[in-house]
């Protein structure tokens, strides 16, 4: 089977000096670094010097009375030198004092000893990255992100206090599986693993895209790990390491797919990756079966990678709420329902993913974000970031904030290029005169990397967590947003049917909504839970596949009564983590069919909302659907499926269905 994938679219180290005979005032601008520091001189020094030691892992550059980078000093016409190179490595995660030796080589070599106190914390307000304060997903102050309108204060990922605890993703390796990655980009290069990426088109370690109209992967990477420095913006995890695998622009073969998801130890080396970002979706004429070889790689990845703790696979839910390929979405649009379902992508209907929906700067679902019970979490993805002065006549969502992130470098290529007809920022106005950044990137393609960045912070805070522990922490700490949103009801011949439920609290106390999963990601709460005496989950398990066999039950036309069937589940595991069903049904308009599942505890989840864009003449043949709404509930007992025909176009039959429950 050939798979077709579609893309879903500064702090400066400051050293305060007090010394006998000290002084000298360097004014050269420094590259942004990992920490802030205060130097207290414990011995006499002559006029100007630079302090550094390989024992102080404080980043790439220092601004004291001068600058050094990797051991090169520039002090009052280069009269000083440092004792050893300073390599970028693990930053101090608390206030720490070091003793270092400083050599001044002006006219006579003079060596002095000083005491350096390093504070590893930073905050968004103190960033020297000039675009950071417009990155509303980091801290929403109502800023416009260079669009025409702003958002709602506080509708962000709540990450500032995490930075105040010195977490920045250091030591966490992330793969951007996408269209490319500009590894030499000024705001990414310092975090890109040297020779760690892979280009499937030419078998090289440089996946830089040849596109002239924007590289999706480069923009995705920026949201994860733009460096903290004095240029551009900042990623959610600004010290995470990056690899780029351009699977989408190379041969989209099964072998390349597996290799890009951790199944290769060399060329590419992907088996050392902690978190895989997949900002793309699968579309193959409504074939709902995941390829068995790729599925096996996901299982292997969560079983064997990260020394058996499992890699994290993060995936976009899709951008099909209002439009879905060539499908007719008029009925869904009129009803206020999602035209695409997140589970229409078979790789979203497996329990090994963290499927992410998108929110906008107002803290509600982005206009395009695909809904469905497969969603685990939501994160900022924004709207469209346009300016009416450049692109007049569009709807209000067009002028609401999108995401500020990296773009292909210079003004001749990229989303931001001369006459790009989206926004003044993209057209090269200040502060984007070199067009190395864009403010119109959006989609669940943006929500996934924001989530990956938060996961990197969580894993840095607690490296012992398994992939399921991370998912559990995300679900437990998620922020319920848009909590007054009413259910979407459709009127049928004999009553009103709830085709999209409101927020539901399940029997285990978890809140769930098909638009948001467990809610908006909450970085501070998640990191706090990860570090606060967290107890690892019990082993992962699953039931056997339980089948109804052929039942051939008629589905009443345009009726809330629907047709139901029960399967009884028993044995281990005892607590639910995900429920996966397959459904086969005949109908001349299967898009009209709604499918719901009720747990033994009485929680109801709608897995297919009806009136969607499935197709007018496609029967359901082993449609695989997953629901996360039952998380934490007791597994044993009767599970009831119900199919409802939500329109008056002919009748259908529920042929058979199966259930498999994953949990602990």
Image (cartoon, rainbow, N blue to C red):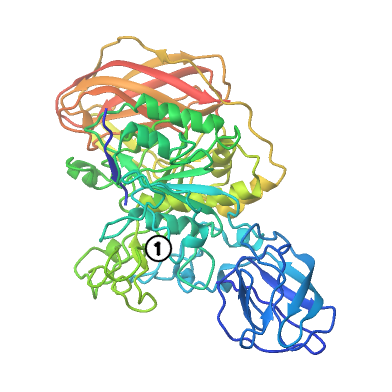
> Where in the figure is residue 186, as x and y percent of width and height?
44, 67
Q: Please indicate whether residue 518 sits to the left or right of residue 559 in the image.
A: right
> Where in the figure is residue 541, as x and y percent of width and height?
55, 22
Q: Quadrant of residue 128?
A: bottom right
- Tell me: residue 324, above or below residue 139: above
Front-most of residues 562 and 472: 472
* Residue 365 seen in this snapshot: no
Q: Residues within 10 Å of mark 1 (few under 14, many from 20)?
A: many
The C terminus: image quadrant: top right
Front-most of residues 260 and 319: 260
> Where in the figure is residue 70, as x and y percent of width and height?
61, 68
- Tell me: residue 25, above or below residue 298: below
Which SS class for mark 1?
A: strand
* Residue 654 seen in this snapshot: yes
- Tell me: residue 314, above or below residue 628: below
Q: Please indicate whether residue 480 sits to the left or right of residue 658 in the image.
A: right
Q: Image point 51% across, 64% down: which residue?
A: 139
Q: In the rendered image, which residue does mark 1 sit on?
A: 406
């Amino acid at each position: 089977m050939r798979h077709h994938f579609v893309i879903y679219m500064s702090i400066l180290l400051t050293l305060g000096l007090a010394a006998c005979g000290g002084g000298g005032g360097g004014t050269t601008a420094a590259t942004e670094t990992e920490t802030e520091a205060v130097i207290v001189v414990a011995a006499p020094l002559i006029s100007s010097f630079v302090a550094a030691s390989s024992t102080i892992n404080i980043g790439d550059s220092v601004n004291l009375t001068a600058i050094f980078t990797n051991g090169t000093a520039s002090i009052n016409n280069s009269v000083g030198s440092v004792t050893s190179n300073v390599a970028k490595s693990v930053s101090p995660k608390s206030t720490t004092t070091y003793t270092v030796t400083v050599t001044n080589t002006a006219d006579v070599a003079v060596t002095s000893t000083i005491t350096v106190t390093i504070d590893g914390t930073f905050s968004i307000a103190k960033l020297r990255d000039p675009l950071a304060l417009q990155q509303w997903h980091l801290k929403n102050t109502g800023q416009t992100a260079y669009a025409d309108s702003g958002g709602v204060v506080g509708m962000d990922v709540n990450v500032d206090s995490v930075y105040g605890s010195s977490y920045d993703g250091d030591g966490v390796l992330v793969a951007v599986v996408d269209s490319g990655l500009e590894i030499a980009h000024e705001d990414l290069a310092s975090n890109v693993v040297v020779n760690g990426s892979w280009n499937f088109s030419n078998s090289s370690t440089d996946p830089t895209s040849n596109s002239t109209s924007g590289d999706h992967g480069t923009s995705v990477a920026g949201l994860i790990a733009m460096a903290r420095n004095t240029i551009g913006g900042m990623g959610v995890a600004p010290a995470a390491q990056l690899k780029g695998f351009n699977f989408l622009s190379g041969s989209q073969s099964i072998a390349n797919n597996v290799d890009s998801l951790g199944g290769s130890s060399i060329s590419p080396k992907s088996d050392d990756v902690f978190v895989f970002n997949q900002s793309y979706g699968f579309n193959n004429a409504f074939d709902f079966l995941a390829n068995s070889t790729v599925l096996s790689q996901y299982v292997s990845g969560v079983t064997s990678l990260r020394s058996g703790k499992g890699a994290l696979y993060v995936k976009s839910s899709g951008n099909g709420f209002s439009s879905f390929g060539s499908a007719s979405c008029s009925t869904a649009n009129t009803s206020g329902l999602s035209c695409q379902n997140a589970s229409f992508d078979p790789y979203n209907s497996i329990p090994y993913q963290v499927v992410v929906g998108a929110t906008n700067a107002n803290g509600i679902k982005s206009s395009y974000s695909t809904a469905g019970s497969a969603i685990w979490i939501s994160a900022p993805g924004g709207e469209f970031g346009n300016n009416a002065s450049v692109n007049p006549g569009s709807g209000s969502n067009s002028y609401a904030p999108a995401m500020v992130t990296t773009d292909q470098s210079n003004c001749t290529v990229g989303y931001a290029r001369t006459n790009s007809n989206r926004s003044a920022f993209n057209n090269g106005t200040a502060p984007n005169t070199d067009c190395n950044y864009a403010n119109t990137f959006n989609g669940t393609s943006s929500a996934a990397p924001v989530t990956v960045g938060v996961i990197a912070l969580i894993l840095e805070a607690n490296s012992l967590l398994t992939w399921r522990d991370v998912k559990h922490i995300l679900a437990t700490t998620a922020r319920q947003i848009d909590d007054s949103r009413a259910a979407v009801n459709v009127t049928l011949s004999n009553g009103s049917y709830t085709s999209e439920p409101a927020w539901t609290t399940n029997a285990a106390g978890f809140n769930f909504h098909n638009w948001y999963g467990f809610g908006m990601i909450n970085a501070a709460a998640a990191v706090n839970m990860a570090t606060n005496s967290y107890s690892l989950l019990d082993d992962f398990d699953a039931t056997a596949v339980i089948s109804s066999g052929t039942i051939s039950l008629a589905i009443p036309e345009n009726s809330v009564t629907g047709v139901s069937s029960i399967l009884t589940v028993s044995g281990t595991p005892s607590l639910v983590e995900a429920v996966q069903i397959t459904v086969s049904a005949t109908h001349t308009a299967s898009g009209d069919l709604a499918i719901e599942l009720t747990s033994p505890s009485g929680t109801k989840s709608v897995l297919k909302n009806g009136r969607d864009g499935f197709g007018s003449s496609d029967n359901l043949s082993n449609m695989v659907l997953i629901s996360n709404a039952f998380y934490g509930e007791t597994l044993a007992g009767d599970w009831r499926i119900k199919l409802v025909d939500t329109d008056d176009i002919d009748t259908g039959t529920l042929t058979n269905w199966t259930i498999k429950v994953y949990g602990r």
